[in-house]
Image (cartoon, coloured by chain):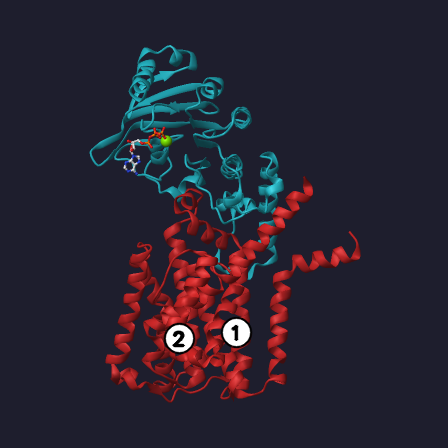
Chain colours: A red, B cyan
Amino acid sequence: MSAKDKILYFIWLHRTGLTVGALGLVLGFYPLFQDNPYFLGISNLIGIYLIVTIGLNLFIGYAGQISLGHAGFVALGAYGSAILTADLGWNPWLALIIVALLVGLAALLVGIPTLRLSGHYLAMATLGFNIVIYTILIQWDKITGGPSGFAGIPPLSVFGMPIDDELRFHYVIWPLAIIFLTLALNLVRSGLGLGLAALAQNETAASALGIKVSRAKIQVFVLSAVLASVGGSLFAHCFTFVNPHSFSIFTSLELVTMVVIGGLGSVWGSLFGTALIVLMPEYLEFFETYKDIIHGLILVVVLTVFPQGLISGLRDMARLKILQRRDIAQH
Amino acid sequence: MLSIDHLTKHFGGLPALNDVSFDCPAGRITTLIGPNGAGKSTLINCVTGVLVPDKGSVRLEGTEIGREPSYRIPYHGIARTFQNLALFPRLSVLENVLSGLTVEAETGFLKSIFRPPATRNHERRLRLKAMEMLDRFVLAGKADWPVGELSYGDRKRVEMARALVSGPRILFLDEPVAGLNAEESAAIGEEICRLRNLGLTILLVEHDMDLVMAVSDGIVVLDSGELIAQGSPEEIRHNPKVIEAYLGRMSVTA
Ligand SMILES: Nc1ncnc2c1ncn2[C@@H]1O[C@H](COP(=O)(O)OP(=O)(O)OP(=O)(O)O)[C@@H](O)[C@H]1O
Ligand SMILES: [Mg+2]
C-alpha cells in the first residue's frame, strides 16, 4: 500500500470516530463565530430534539417498529423534572436521572402489552398513550399547571455555575448529544444492533437464529423512552417553562417526521432530519403557518423516492453503485 | 439423536400432521418427502419452535425440546433453512451470515454501547468466521452486497451459509435446491453429503428425487399429515403406497 492508500484506509476504517470528532470540533468552536443567542437557541433546540430522535430511530428505523406517542415520554421527562426541581427542590441532574429511570419503567409497563401489536395497531396504541398523557397534563392542573403551563423551573447548574444562557447551554447540551450519538453508533454496530435490524426485516428468521424478539423490542422501546425523557428534562431546564401544547400528538408526528426524512436506520440521518425540521420554519416564514401540510408533503415526496428516508436512501444507492462498479472492474 | 413421537398439528379442523413418529439417527441424512401440502414444512416448524405442536414430543438425545420457543432452539446446536428464503434483504451478505452467530455474539447492553476492546476483538473473530463461511459458499466477492440484490441461487447459498456458520450438530433443510439449476443443485447436494461426512445429523425436505435418492440414508414419506412409509431409498422407490401417493396426485394435476 502506498502512503496515500494507507491514509485513505485509515480514514475509512475510522470513519465513524473521525466524523464524530469533526462534529465535536465544529460544535466546540461554533460559538466563537456565532454568538448570537437566537441562533445558539435554535442549535440548542436541535441538540435537545436530537437526543429524542436518536432513540426513536433505534425503535423505528432499526427495530422496524412505529411509535406515534414519543412526545408523551418527552412530556413525562419535562414535567417530572419540573415537579421534582421546582416543587420539591431536587438537584436538576439527580431529577433528570431519576425521572429517566422512572420513565423507562413506565415504558416497560406500556411496552409489554402494546409491543405484541404490530403495524397500525401499534401506531394506534402509542397514539393513545400520547393522548392520555396530554389529557392528564391538561386536567391535573394542581400539579401540572394545566393548559397555562408550568413556570419557574430552575436552570441546570454545573459546578455551581447556573446554565442560564444559550451559550452555556450549548456547552451542556451538545456534549450530551454527541455522547448519546456515539453510544447509538456503537449500539447499531454491535451484535445487539444487528439483531434489531434482523428482527425488523424478518421476525421468524431472527427468532430462529436465537434473537428473543419480544424482549429485544421492549428493550429498545424502553431505551428510546429513556432518551425521550432526558430530552424532555433538558427542554424543561432550558426554557424554565413548559406547557402541554409542546407535547401533543403533533409533536410525536414531528419527531417521526424527523426520523423518517433523515433516514430509517441511519443515526446520522437523525441529525440531518432533526436539523432540517427545526431549521425550516426559521428560514421559510410561510412554513410556520403551513407546518403540518409541509411536513406531510415532505414525507410523501421523500418516501416515494427513498422508502428508507433521505440519508439512508442516498447511502444505500451510493453503496450499490460502488459495488456494481467494483463488480464490473473485476470481470 | 432426534426422536419425533406422535407429533400432531391441526390448523383449524385440518390435520397438517397426524401422529407422526420417526427418528433421525446421528450422523445420517434423513429425508422427508411427500406431495405438496403433506405437512413436511409443518413438521420442521414444529420441531424448531416456529409452531407449537398440539400433541406429541420431540426429543434431542432424551431432552424434550418440542415446546421450546424458537429462539432457544439454536442453543441446542440446531440450525435450519426456510422453504421460502427467510433472509434480511437490506442487510449485506456478510451481516446475514453474521446473524447466524447470534448465539455467540455479545448482546450485553453496556458492552454493546461502550464496545470495549474485548468486545471488538470478539466481533472481529465472529466476522472472520463468517468470512470463512462465505468463502466456502463462493460468496466472498459478494460480502458487502445487500442480499436483496442477489440472484436466487446466491440467496439460497447465503441461507445455507447462515445456517452453518455456528457449526450446528443438527441441520434442517427445507427444500435447499428448489428453484436452482442442475449445476447449483449438484453443488448443494455435494455440500450436504460433505456435512454428513463431517458428522452432522441432517433432516432434509426435498422434492428433487434424483437428489433425494443420491444423498439419503433413510427416507420418511408423509401424505396429508400421515406417515405412510419409512425405509431406505431402495425400499421407498419400490413401495406401492408411495408410488400411489405420488401417482395419485399426478393424475389429479394432469
Ligand atoms: N400457518 C398455517 N395456517 C394454516 N394452514 C397451514 C399453515 N401452514 C400450513 N398449512 C396447511 O397445512 C398443510 C401442510 O402444509 P406444509 O406447508 O407443511 O406442506 P409441505 O409438505 O411443506 O408442502 P410443500 O411441498 O408444498 O412445501 C397444507 O394444507 C397447508 O395449507
Ligand atoms: Mg413445505
Q: Nearer the viewer, mark 2 or mark 1?
A: 2
Q: Position of residue A11 (x, y in %)?
A: 68, 60
Tell me the crowding category of disc 1: few under 14, some 14 to 19, or many 20 or more residues within 10 angstroms, Cα based.
some
Asked if marks 2 and 1 touch (Cβ < 8 Å), the reply is no
Q: Label 2: which residue? A: A291
- Residue A170 placement: quadrant: bottom right
- Residue under mark 1: which chain is it in? A
Residue A101 visible? The answer is no
Furthest-left residue in view? B13
Residue B16 appearing in the image: yes
Q: Position of residue B108 (x, y in %)?
A: 48, 55
* A299 left or right of B121 in image: left
Q: Amino acid at mark 1?
A: Leu
Q: Which secondary structure lies at badge 1?
A: helix
Residue where numbered disc 1 is placed: A176
Residue at image x 63%, y 80%? Answer: A29
Q: What residue lies at 41% left-to-right and 55% top-to-bottom?
A: A64
Residue closest to the eye, A320 or A206: A320
Q: CA distance from mark 2 to mark 1?
A: 29 Å
Query: Which one is earlier in the sequence, the residue at label 2 or at label 1?
Result: 1
* A206 versus B205 height, above or below: below
Which quadrant of the figure contains the C terminus of chain A? Answer: top right
The quadrant of the picture showing ligand 1 is top left
**Which quadrant of the figure has residue A78?**
bottom left
Residue occupying image coordinates x 46% and y 31%: B170
Q: Is residue A235 left or right of residue A144?
A: right
- Identify whether A113 is placed above or below B240: below
Three-letter code, disc 2 = Lys
Residue B177 location, x and y as percent? 47, 29
Residue at 49% across, 88% down: A164
